[in-house]
Structures are given as structure tokens and as C-alpha cells.
Amino acid sequence: MHPISASPPDAADGLRRPLFYGFFGFVLVALACLVDRTAWDITLIPRLLALLAFLALALTVVAVPRVARLLDVTVLREPVVPLFGGFTLVTCGSLAVAQNVSAGFTDLFRTLATFLTLCLACLILPIVPRWRERIVGVFVVAGLVAAAVGCFEIVTRLGFGLHGRRAMEQITGLMSSVNLYAGLLALLLPWCFCGAVVLRTAGRAWALLAGAAILVLVVLLQSRAAWLAVLAGAAAAAGLLIVDGGSVGLSRRCRGLLAAALLLVPCGLAAGIAAAPADNPLAQRFRSIFVAPADPTASPREGGRLMVWGITARMIADHPLAGVGAGNFTVRFHEYFGGDDLDFSNVDTNWLQPHNDFLWVFAEKGLPGILLFAGLFVAAFDAAGAIRRSAATAADRWLTLAACAALVSYATLSCFDFPLERINHQVLLVMPLAVIAVIRHRLRPGVVPPQTLAAWPARFVVVPLALAAAATGIVYSTAALRQEREVLAARRAWRAGRWEEARDAARRARTGWKTLDPLASPVAFLEGMAELRLGRLPESIACLEEARIDNPNRMYVINNLGILYAQAGRFDEAIDMFVTVSGRYPHRIEPFNNLAGCLIEADRAAEAVELLEGIPPTARNAAVDRNLDIARRQLAAADEAAARPAAATAP
């Protein structure tokens, strides 16, 4: 007999762990630590650029035959993948109806990057042994890093103790705002507590530490949307454990205790908040959900969301099928400011998104977009139900439970905030989708044989197309990041009164890739106003006319263009501008007063008097009173001049 020799190890085995940890370590840990202090928004475009560059590298690596032989592409047939692919195509197609196409490029490439992340996550997740423990371990590291950053900021900026909401707004955790940071923590929390179950002894301790630290931080940061997301995710997880806890080894007694906690904990929280002192910051923040501000000039307790949601609903009703185009919510938003039921006296008018991702998607991408976006959650929960009904292992069930809790938290957060705008939050959306897809795919009956990426004929088309799309996104992100830096320089020079420097920086910031700055102001507007300060009226008018094409509803663009037309003696055009802006912004006095000034210059004093007298006396300022006095005197003089000939011909 010949001796039996062991099979030689696969030459690609040494690539599995580096590929796994390199990919998930970057998208879950490193990406959340990247900032660019020279950009206007230190995270949005810099992280999009970093992710697209990383994805281009990852696509190149997985196309290498030795690596491609490790990846089973049949997992990409799971419903969440084609649904997200369809959502990406709808995002691209929506630009066909956009008023400003360049305004939607950030959304397009962000969605593309997220879709590629989902596909690669589905391919790479199962390539290592014990991948379930390993991916949860990466989540725990991400949670520890995020919590450590937040704790460091609190200690170094505020010191120990309980601080009010205004103070906590300084804590961003390397995000762009405290709310985005709190939302990020809320999405990491289910995975950390999952790690306390599925990891081994040391890993469990770290997972519990990460989960406890995140929970404390979410409470301290006082983001009401994050509070609701945590509560919703916890309730979903508890409900699933109560119903199906036996499959993961929970006794009936444990499930009973969990059911009691599900009822008693909210009651205890409510009682504690009710009994807390009036000056307790946490209690104040919670009560603000239900109690209107005592100061009538303060922002509404819901921050103006209800009013903005109503405006968004009107936009959806006007464009239900195709939407207004990706990125064009902020361009079209001000068209709906003319309603009598709107009061912007104490609410900022520059909303870049409606603080509700479902309404946002519906408004910009129409019915196909919202159906596909909502379909992601439906498909994921349906797959989770199939996993629960199958012969899945306890580890698979725990991961599915964490994924469902994370998705519920994300959906809740999306109802009150805008996680869809941030690439980190989108990554934390597709990770539970990928986990559920991989588990469901491995539990399906073996009717579809595995097919490696190396043996997939379509790879010669799909991979180059994906690389080309990522490369285009890199070009766009580079141009957008350069624009942000120049816009920041232009605004700094403007504040310092250095008009030539401001103009030159604004010129450098202008790019066909992105015509609006991060605050949705046309970049041409910055250049035009600098030209005006330099005494170059024709050049200033030309810039503002271009700015109006980029954002035709922006008050400062239309109002200032009308002023420039008036300065150039083009009163008919100026009147058209002021009529437009006063219709768009009926709560602002300036355009009405400017319109009255033009009517006076055009010898239409009667119209000017009627217009200005329609402004309530309490809302008038010195400029309005001055124009009203001029218009009345001009009208009286005209009446007197008209009366003289009549008197001369009287018998």
C-alpha cells in the first residue's frame, strides 16, 4: 500500500485573512477616522474619495486569478444585492430630470460606492474560517475606536461631568456633527452586544466594554434621533429573543425576564425623567420632545421638521413618478415657501435634506426609488425570517438578530435624521444586509452550484465597468474636494475684505463637476459678489446670471441679481427678479422693499404704495418706512400734476 499523503495547502490560503481584515478593517474602522481639515465639510467628500480609491484597489485585487478563485459570485443573486443595484441605477437615471445635474453627483457616487461595498462584502465575508466571529470582532474594534474618540473629545474639551446639549454639540467623534456621531454609535451598538455572546472570553469582555461605552455616550450626546434608534433596535432584538430565544439557548425563564424588562425599563425611564430636577440636562432634552419652547422666538421643539416634511410631501405630490432628481431637493425646496401655513421666523431656511431619508428618497428619486429603498429592508427582514425558520446555527441566529436590530435602528434614525447622506452610515447599512445575504445564501438548498469569480464569464465586463465607475467617482471627488478648499479660502478672504483674493479663490473653485458649494450656494455667486466689491458691475451680473441657472430659487442669488439689474438701470428685469423672490420668500421683507424701490424708479408709485402698505406696521423697518414715504410723496406729486390741467380748463 502506498502511504496516504495530505493534500497540499491552497496557494491562495495565505491571502484570505489579509483580504478579510484589510477590507473590513478599512470600511468599518479606518474610514471613520479619516478627516480633512482643509475641506469645508471635513468628512463628506474626503471619506467618499478615500472609499472610492480603496474600492478601486479592492476591485483590482479581487480580479487577480488567485484571489478570484476564493470568491463565490452566486451570493450576489440574493435579493438585497440586485435591489441595491436597481437603486443605484435609479439614482443615476434621476439625473435626467434634475434641474441641476451636478448637484446630484455626490449622491450618485456615494450610492455607487455603497453598492460596490455591499458586493465586495458579500464576496469576502465567507472566505475565512469562523468568519462570523471575525466580522463581529471588527465591529467591536470599530465600536471601541469610536467610543474612545468621543470620550477623548469630552474629557479634553469639556471635562468630566454631565453637560448640557449646547456644550455637547462640540463633540463630533470625527464626524461633522454631534447628531451624525451619535447615529454612528447607535448603528454600532447591536454588533458590540452581539460580540458579548458570540466571541470568546477576552473578546466578550472587550465587546461588553465597547457596548457599555457606546450606550453611555449615546445618552450623554443627547441626540433624540439616536435615542429613538437605540430604543427601537433594542426593542426589536428583545422581541425576537422573546419569540425565538429557545433556538439560541435562552431558557423560558430568561425570556420571561426579558419580556418583563421590555415593559418595565421604558416605565422606569419615564419615571426617572419625570422625577429628575428641572435643571438636569438629560431630562431637559427628553422633555423638549413634548414641550414647546418657552421663548416664542426659539426653534420649534421638533426643529422645524414637521413643516419641512410637509413641504417635502408637496414636492412628492408634484413629482411622484420621477422625483426632482438626485441632489436637487435643496434646489427645488424653496419653490414651496409661498404657503400661508409656513412660518420661517424661527427656523433656518437652508435645508439641504428633509431630515427623513424615506421622504428624501421619494422626493428626489420618485416612486421607483422609494420602492427599491424600502424593498432593501423588506428583503432583508424576509431573509432573516427564512434564516429563523431554517436549521441555522446559534451563531448564525445571533448575527441575524444583530443585523435586524441594526437595520431597525437605521430605519428609525432615517425617519428623523439623514444617515443616507454619510458614507460611514451607508456602510453600516450594507453590512447587516451583507451578513444576512451570506447566511441566507449558505442555508439555501444546494440547487445552485458555487461559481467562483475566476470562472464567471461576466467578470471581463463587470469588473472593468466597476473600475471605470469608481475611477470616474475619484475624478469627481477630487474636483469636489478641491472646490471645498477654495470655497473655504474665498469665504475667509471675503470676511477679511480681501476682494481680489476672494474672487480668485472662487474662480479656482468653479468646476463643471460641482456647481454648488456644501451649503448649496452657487460658486459663481461668490465670484460675482467679489466682482461687485471690485466695482465690476457687468462681470458681477454675468456671474449672478450663471448662479441663477445653478440654483434658480436661492434668495440671495435672485435678490442680489435684482439689485444689480437696478444699479445697471435695467428696471424691468429687476422687477421680475424681485417679484420672483418675494413670491418665493413671503416671510422676508427685503425683496418687497426692493421691489417697491424699483417700482418707484419706474414711476409706478401707486403700485409701490399698495405693496408697502400691505406690510404689517410691526414688520416694517426704517428702509421700508423711507420707501413708503418717497412713494407717497411721488404719488401725491403725480396726482397734483394731473389735477393742474383739469383746473386750467374749468369754466
Image (cartoon, rainbow, N blue to C red):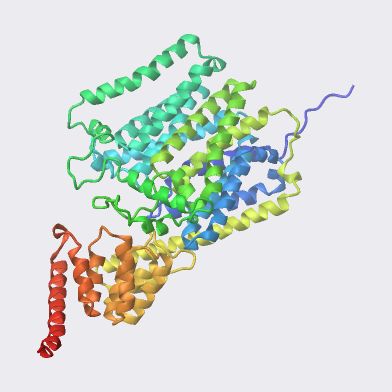
Specify the quadrant that holds the N terminus.
top right
User: Does the rendering let one see residue 206?
Assistant: no
- Is residue 617 shown left or right of residue 495? left
Is any atom of residue 584 visible in this view?
yes
Name, please, the residue furthest toward the right.
1
The residue at 37%/47% (across/down) is 310
Q: Residue at x 27, y 38 (%)?
A: 155
**Residue 585 sits above or below residue 246 on the image:** below
Residue 91, percent from left and from top? 54, 52
Q: Is residue 394 toward the left or the right of residue 276 in the image? A: right
Question: Measuring 18% from the left and 45% from the top, which residue is drawn there?
Answer: 296
- Percent position (x, y) of residue 531? 32, 77
Q: Nearer the viewer, residue 132 or 190?
A: 190
**Count of picture labels:** 0
Q: Quadrant of the C terminus?
A: bottom left
* Observer-nearest of 484 and 327: 327
Residue 228: give x, y in percent of width and height. Answer: 37, 33
Q: Nearer the viewer, residue 177 or 455?
A: 177
Tell whether 117 sits left or right of 167.
right
Residue 218 drawn at (x, y percent) = 35, 34
Which residue lies most toward the front here? 651
Above/below status of 123 relative to 332: above
Q: Is residue 413 above or below residue 520?
A: above
